[in-house]
Structures are given as C-alpha cells and as structure tokens.
C-alpha cells in the first residue's frame, strides 16, 4: 500500500493527498476482489478439464471454444436456481454461513506479496495473521452444518471442525521453522530473504532440508484445512451426501464452493510466499519491468500450486477418519517439532556443508523412526471359509 | 480513530450482551465469537497487532471452536431454547458478583502505571519483538512453568480418555 501511495503521489503531483490516500487504499482491495475470484472461476474450468483427462473423458467443451465460457454459464445457471431453505432450519444462521465463508479466504490475500512492495498491508506479523485468519472459516462451516438441522450436515460440521483444529497445529509449527530462519514475521521480508543466489532461485527455502520438510507439511496442512481431496471427509459425497452444504442450493452453494477454493488458493499463496520464494525468480526486482516479471513469477508459482492440488485430487483416494486424525497427531506434529530443532542446527552450525549433512541426517532419521512407529500392522492372509 | 473506536465498541458490547442474553446455546457461542473479534479489532486499533492476531488465533480459532465442539458432542445438538429465567435469584446474585468484580478491576486498572503510559496510539511500533525478548529473557521461568503445566494437562487428558476406552472394551 505504501509503495502504491508513493507511486501515485509522484505521478499525480497536483492531486490532493487525501484522494491519493483513498486511491492507495482502494487499488489493493480492487485487485484482491477482482483477480482472485477471476482465478477461482478459471480454476473451476481447469480443474474439471484436468480431472476429465485424468479420468479418461473430455470434461466441459461445449460452451465457447474449449469450454472457456463454462464458468460464466455455471454462474448464470446457479444465479437462476431456486434458493431452498429447510423449514426447520435456523434461518438467520443458515443465511449467514455462506456469507461468512468467503471472508477468511479473501483476508489472507491481504498479506501475500505479489511483487516487490506490492502487498495490501505490510503487517509486521503477516505470517501469523495469515495463519490465524485462515482457520476462521471453520466457524462458518460449523454454522452451516448446525443451522441446517440435518444429521448429515452436523456430521460434516463435526468432521470439519475436528479436522481443521487438528491440522492447524502442524501447519503453524511448519510456519515457525520459516519464521525462525528468516528472523521475521513479515511476509514481505521473508520473500526478500529468499532472493539472491543462483538466478534468484537457489535461496528459496524449499531448497533447504528443513524447508523441504516444512513445504511438505504445509501442503498437507493446506489441503486439510481447505478440506480438499484427499482430506475432503467433511463433504464426503459417498457417505454424507454433501456434508455441511447438503441443505444449500443456488447461489449459497456457489458461495460455499467459492469460499473453499479461495481458502485453498490462499493457502497455496502462503505456501509460495514462505517456501517457494514468493515473487522471486530470474529477472524479478524493483522497477516497472522487474515488478511485472516478479508478478508473473508469483502467479506462475500460484498456478503451479493449484495444479498440484488438482493433480492430487484426481489421483488420490480419500482418507478414513481414524487415519486422518492419527496422521495429524502422530506423524505431522512430531515431524514439525523435529523440523524446528533442525532449523536450530542450521542456524548455529557454521560451515554450511556440515549444517547440510547434520540437518539432513537428523530429519531423515526422525522420518524413518516416525514412519516405522506408525506403520500399520501387516495384513494377515485372508481365509475364505465359506466358499 | 475515534469513530472507529465507537463503532467497534458498539459491536463488541452488542456481542457480549447477546452472548449472555440469547436463549440458544449455539447462538450464544456465535455472539461470543463476535465479541472476541471485536476485542481483536480493538487491539488492532491500538496498534497492538501481535495481541490482536493472537486473540483471533487463540480465542476464535481454538477456544470458541472447542466450545462448539463440546456442544456438538453432547446430546442436545440442535440447541433447543433453555428456560427463560430473567430477574430470578440466579440473575441477581450474578449481577452483584459482576458489579463487585467490575469495581475491583476498575481500581486495579486505574492504579496501574501502565494505564498512564498507554495512549501512544498512532506512533506505536509493532510489539512482537519486545514481547518475544521479554518472554525468553525476563519471564523464561514462568513461561516454562506454564509449558510444563499445559503438557501435564494434555497427558492427563489422554490418560483419562485411555482409561475410558479400556473400560468400554
């Protein structure tokens, strides 16, 4: 925001300061409200196409060339649908839930920098803000499930709450590793720390032993918190019809979809910022050209993360509830704690090769121990007695 | 600044009032969440960004969710309205206790030297670095004591749950 203010102030010198101030406020908000929902609309199309390819079918290809107008047609269709509210539903809460679910996803983008200086609010505690706000969507999910007065909805809400609360812990712990290494909570500074090196790439945190582990933890946590496959138990359509949004139709249902996708994309954006160097890449830097290249790099990485999400959704089956909980508490959380110790090693061991060897060894040993301890019992050979 | 303060205060007080006066338990929790967010907004207004974020992370993200979870695990999930007993004996005794507590707190807050320093307002810097330094330098023993206490509580909860599982088998 400060950068935009300065740019506007120098280019339009004769415009009063208060007008420039208001414009500097409105431009990032318009950007967030315009760009990310547009990416959401495109993502729905790309996802359906990609899933179609994975499942050996075409996907939408009738509306416009390559089905490019499909999101528009979907939006129009869903606007014209009848909005049905169950007679026994808690009307006010039932109405409020789809409104609230979009907000946390949008708030996270406030602290995700897209180019040098281009962040809506450069909060000193940006990472913490993103993690704190990102989990608020669970309240909207609960409201939706509870207000519907439907046992499938309530079950979905129970699952959603338990899942988000469980996976919040390892995700935050994985973020702590980055915060320790960068020595700051500001997202902009964390991205700057990942610049330099070979082609602006070699200093990304994902290319550190602890960074790779944190990256994996963060992707898993992000998938679980936005309830995407393979963690989509809250809305498991084969068991719970639709989970918390069983009783929603029309545009309210669309808002649920939108909130879910925005939250998933927000987690992808935070992952890019923390581990993939944010806007850093070959050619990125200050100035107009460097800024545009930086922005391109950020959105390329964001698209890559969204693509990874779609790929995972198309290829992995859903977890069971007990597997879900055990995975969070018995594997991810210890691994995240061990990862924090690894960052400590990395920080204090002076010759870099030594630090590489020791942190890698430490993490590999713990990974093997944790996987060995949590290995499921070998299945006995089945005996079919009544053939 | 002043207008924002009044708006946020109105919302916060509304949330608190609804939390104690609504008859449906889930509605009360949702009002309580509104109150928590209002308090967080107050912290942001005072430029205490760390405190505000932690307020959201802990109170909205953990405490309120825990309450919701407790409600969902009880039998009365639909949250039918409770008995309407305003101005009964319980109400009056509660009011007396609350008033006494408010008077005590007011004295304590006004006699604290911090109350005189606070209105720095607009120029105040982010406090997270100082908080971190204070926690691991001056207050490291209380911090560790709290950590041990919480760990013990966590393990205790697991032990109690384990006993029940073994009984039911």
Image: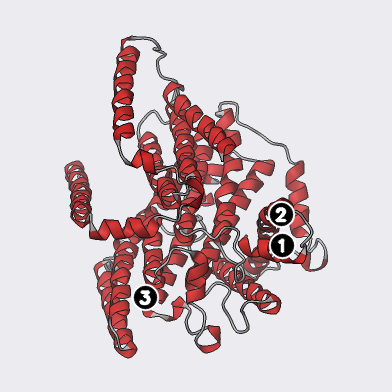
Q: Which mark is residue B133?
A: none
Sort mark 2 into few (<14), some (14-19) or many (20+) by Cα contacts within 10 Å. Answer: some
Residue drawn at the location 39% of the way across and 28% of the way down: B76
Q: Quadrant of the C terminus of chain A?
A: bottom left
Secondary structure at numbered mark 2: helix
Q: Which mark is residue A17?
A: 2
Horizontal and vertical percent for residue B8? 53, 36
**Chain label for disc 1:** A
Horizontal and vertical percent for residue A118? 62, 66
Query: Do pointers 1 and 2 mark residues of a single chain?
Result: yes
Residue drawn at the location 60% of the way across and 30% of the way down: A86
**Chain label for disc 3:** A
Coloring scheme used: secondary structure
Which residue is most to the right?
A64
Cα separation, mark 1 vs mark 3, equals 42 Å
Query: Do pointers 3 and 2 mark residues of a single chain?
Result: yes
Residue A364 in view:
no
Q: Are marks 1 and 2 in contact (CB under 8 Å)?
A: yes
**A315 up-or-down from B139: above or below:** below
Query: Do pointers 1 and 3 mark residues of a single chain?
Result: yes
Residue B42 as seen in the image, left or right of residue A360: right
Cα separation, mark 3 vs mark 2, equals 46 Å
Horizontal and vertical percent for residue A258? 63, 52
Q: Which mark is residue A9?
A: 1
Which of discs 3 and 2 lies nearer the camera? The answer is 2
Cα separation, mark 1 vs mark 2, equals 7 Å
- In the figure, residue A52 lies in which quadrant? bottom right
Q: Quadrant of the N terminus of chain A?
A: bottom right
The first of marks 1 and 3 along the sequence is: 1
Task: State the residue position of label 3.
Answer: A210
- In the figure, residue A324 lies in which quadrant? bottom left
């Amino acid at each position: 925001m400060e950068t935009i203010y300065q740019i506007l102030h120098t280019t339009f010198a004769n415009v009063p300061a208060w007008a420039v101030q208001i414009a500097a406020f409105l431009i990032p908000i318009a950007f967030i409200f315009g760009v990310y929902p547009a990416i959401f609309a495109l993502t729905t199309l790309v996802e359906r196409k990609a899933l179609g390819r994975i499942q050996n079918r075409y996907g939408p290809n009738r509306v416009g060339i390559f089905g490019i107008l499909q999101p528009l047609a979907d939006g129009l269709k869903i606007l014209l649908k009848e909005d049905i509210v169950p007679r026994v539903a808690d009307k006010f809460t039932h109405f409020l839930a789809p409104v609230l679910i979009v907000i946390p996803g949008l708030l996270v983008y406030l602290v995700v920098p897209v180019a040098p200086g281009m962040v809506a609010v450069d909060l000193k505690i940006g990472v913490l803000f993103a993690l704190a706000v990102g989990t608020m969507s669970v309240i909207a999910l609960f409201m939706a499930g509870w207000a519907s007065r439907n046992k499938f909805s309530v079950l979905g809400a129970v699952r959603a709450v338990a899942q988000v609360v469980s996976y919040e812990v390892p995700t935050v712990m994985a973020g702590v590793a980055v915060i320790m290494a960068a020595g700051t909570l500001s997202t902009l500074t964390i991205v700057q720390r990942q610049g330099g090196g070979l082609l602006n790439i070699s200093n990304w945190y994902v290319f550190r032993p602890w960074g790779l582990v944190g990256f994996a933890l963060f992707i898993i946590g992000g998938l679980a918190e936005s309830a995407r496959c393979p963690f989509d138990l809250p809305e498991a359509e084969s068991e719970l019809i639709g989970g918390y949004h069983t009783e929603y139709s029309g545009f309210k249902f669309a808002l649920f979809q939108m909130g879910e996708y925005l939250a998933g994309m927000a987690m992808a954006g935070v992952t890019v910022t923390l581990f993939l160097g944010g806007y850093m890449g070959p050619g990125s830097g200050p100035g107009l050209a460097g800024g545009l290249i930086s922005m391109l790099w950020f959105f390329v990485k964001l698209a890559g993360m969204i693509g990874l999400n779609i790929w995972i959704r198309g290829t992995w089956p859903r977890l069971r509830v007990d597997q879900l909980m055990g995975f969070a508490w018995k594997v991810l959380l210890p691994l995240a704690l061990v990862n924090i110790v690894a960052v400590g090693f990395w920080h204090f061991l002076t010759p870099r090769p030594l630090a590489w060897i020791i942190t890698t060894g430490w993490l590999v040993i713990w990974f093997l121990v944790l996987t060995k301890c949590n290995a499921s019992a070998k299945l006995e050979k089945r005996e079919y007695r009544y053939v | 600044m002043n207008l924002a303060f009044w708006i946020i205060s109105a919302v916060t007080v509304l949330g608190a009032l609804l939390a104690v006066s609504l008859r449906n338990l889930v509605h009360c929790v949702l009002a309580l969440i509104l109150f928590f967010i209002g308090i967080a907004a107050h912290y942001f207004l005072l430029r205490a960004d760390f405190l505000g974020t932690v307020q959201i992370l802990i109170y909205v993200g953990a405490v309120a969710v825990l309450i919701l979870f407790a409600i969902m695990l009880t039998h009365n999930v639909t949250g039918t309205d409770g008995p309407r007993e305003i101005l009964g004996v319980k109400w009056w005794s509660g009011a007396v206790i609350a008033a006494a507590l408010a008077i005590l707190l007011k004295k304590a807050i006004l006699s604290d030297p911090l109350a005189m320093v606070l209105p720095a307002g607009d120029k105040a810097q982010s406090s997270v670095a100082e908080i971190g330094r204070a926690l691991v330098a001056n207050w490291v023993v209380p911090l560790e004591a709290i950590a041990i206490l919480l760990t013990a509580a966590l393990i205790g909860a697991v032990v109690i749950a384990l006993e029940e599982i073994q009984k039911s088998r």
